[in-house]
Amino acid sequence: MTTEMKQTEEIIGRAEIDDYEAILSVVGTEEPDGRHVVHSEYDSIFTWDYEKGARPKLNKLYEKAKKAQWNGETDLPWDTAVDQEKLVMEEAAATGGFAAGFDLSGTPVERWTEKEWLTFGVESQNWTLSQFLHGEQGALICTAKIVESVPWIDAKYYASTQVMDEARHVEVFGKYLDEKLSGHYPVNAHLRMLLDDIIADSRWDLTYLGMQIMVEGLALAAFGFMHQMTGDPLLKQLLRYVMADEARHVAFGVLSLQEYYEGLSASELRERQEFAFEAAVRMRDRFLQQEVWERMGIDPKQVVPLVHQAPDRAAFQALLFSKIVPNCKKLGLLDAADGWLRTKFTELGVIEFESWVDTSEEYDAMAATPPTERLAS
Ligand SMILES: [Fe+2]
Ligand SMILES: [Fe+2]
C-alpha cells in the first residue's frame, strides 16, 4: 500500500474512492426518541470592537440580506396543486425516458416496467427533498454556531441573518414535503457523518468551510438543476427564493475565509484541504440514494455501481461541484501544500471547474425580489 492510499483511507475510511461495497455498507439509523445529539466544544467569542463596516464586503452582504427577507408562509403559492406522478413522468420524458442510457441487464431491475420506475421516481423525489430538509437543519445549527464563534462583528451580524434564512428554508422544505409529496426519509448516513464532523469541530473556520463552502456550494448547484428541471411552479418559486439566499451564504463563506486563510501556515492549510476532500467524498457518497433502492426492495450493491458509472451520470454528478471547486481555488486551497487538493479533486473528476465563476460576487446576479418587496415599492 502506498502512502497516498493510506492518507485517503485515514481521511475517508476506505482506500478507494469508488469502493461501492464499502460506501453502501454504511447504513443510517434513526434514533427512536427522534433526537440526534452531537457533542461540540468551542469558544464563544465576544468582541469589544463594535465598528460596523470594518469589513466592508461583509457589511454590504448584511445590508443586502436585511432587504432580501421573504416569508415562506405568505410569499409562495401554496394553493398550487402538485401531481407528483405527472411531474415524474414529464421529467423522465424530458431526459429520454426512465433509466435511459443505462444497461441494467442482469440486474434485479432488468424487468421493471414503467410502473416500478414511476414509483422509483416518486420515492427518489421524496428522498431528495428529505435530504434537502435535513441539510437545511444542519445549516441552521452551523450558522447559529458561527454567530457565537466568529470573532468579527460584521460576520456576527451577517450570520444572524443567515440563521433566519435557514429557519425559513427548513420551514418551506418541511411544508412542501408534508403537503405536496408522499413520504419522508431519514437523513442519509453519509450526509449525517459530514454534518456531525462539521458541527463537532471546535475551529470556527471549519464550520464555514464545511457548511458555507462545501455543503451550501453543492446545494446551490443542486437547487439550480432542480429549479431548471421541475415542472411544478410552486417548487420552482420556492427554489428560486432559496437559491438567492444560498448565493449570499456561499459568498459569506468565501469572503470570510479569504481573509483568514491568508494568515495560515502550509500545514494548517493542509488540514483544511483534507477536510474539504472528506466533505466532497461524503457528498458524493450520498448521491447514491441507497435508501431509495432499499425501499424498492432492491439490494443497492447490485444496481448502484452500474447506474453511477454510466458516463452521463458521472458528468452530471461532477457538475454538482461546479461551485465548490472555483471557491476552493479562490481561497487558495487548491494549490497550497504542494497542490494536494488539486490532486484529490483531479481524482474525483471535478478539477475541470476550477476556472468557473466563483461565488464571492455572484449573489447580486442571483438576487430574487420577494413579492412583499415588489408590493411595497
Ligand atoms: Fe439554506
Ligand atoms: Fe444556506
Image: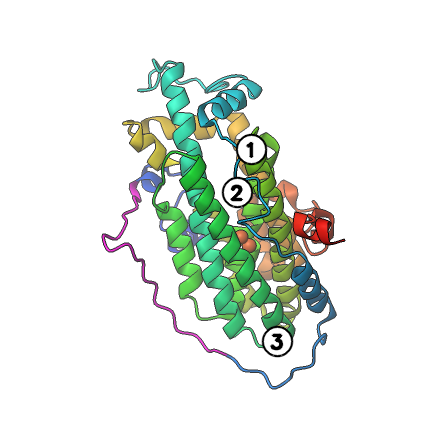
- Element type at marker 2? helix
* Range drawn in magenta: 25-44
Which residue sits at x=59%, y=33%?
233
Reply yes or no: does residue 26 show up in magenta.
Answer: yes
Percent x, y of residue 72: 54, 50
Residue 152: numbered disc: 3
Amino acid at pointer 3 = Trp
Labels 2 and 1: the sequence-earlier one: 1
Percent x, y of residue 252: 63, 61
Amino acid at pointer 1 = Phe
Labels 3 and 1: the sequence-earlier one: 3
Label 3 environment density (alpha carbons within 10 Å; few <14, some 14–19, many ≥20): many
Say left or right for 357 vs 284: right
Total numbered labels: 3
Is 94 situated above or below 271? above
Report which residue position mark 2 lands on: 347
Report which residue position mark 1 lands on: 316
- Whether residue 271 is visible: no
Amino acid at pointer 2 = Glu
Q: In the image, which is nearer the foreground, mark 3 or mark 1?
A: 3
Is 56 situated above or below 135? below
Which residue sits at x=52%, y=40%?
78
Q: Nearer the viewer, residue 61 or 206?
A: 61
Main SS of the magenta part reads loop
- Element type at marker 1? helix
Which residue sits at x=28%, y=49%?
30
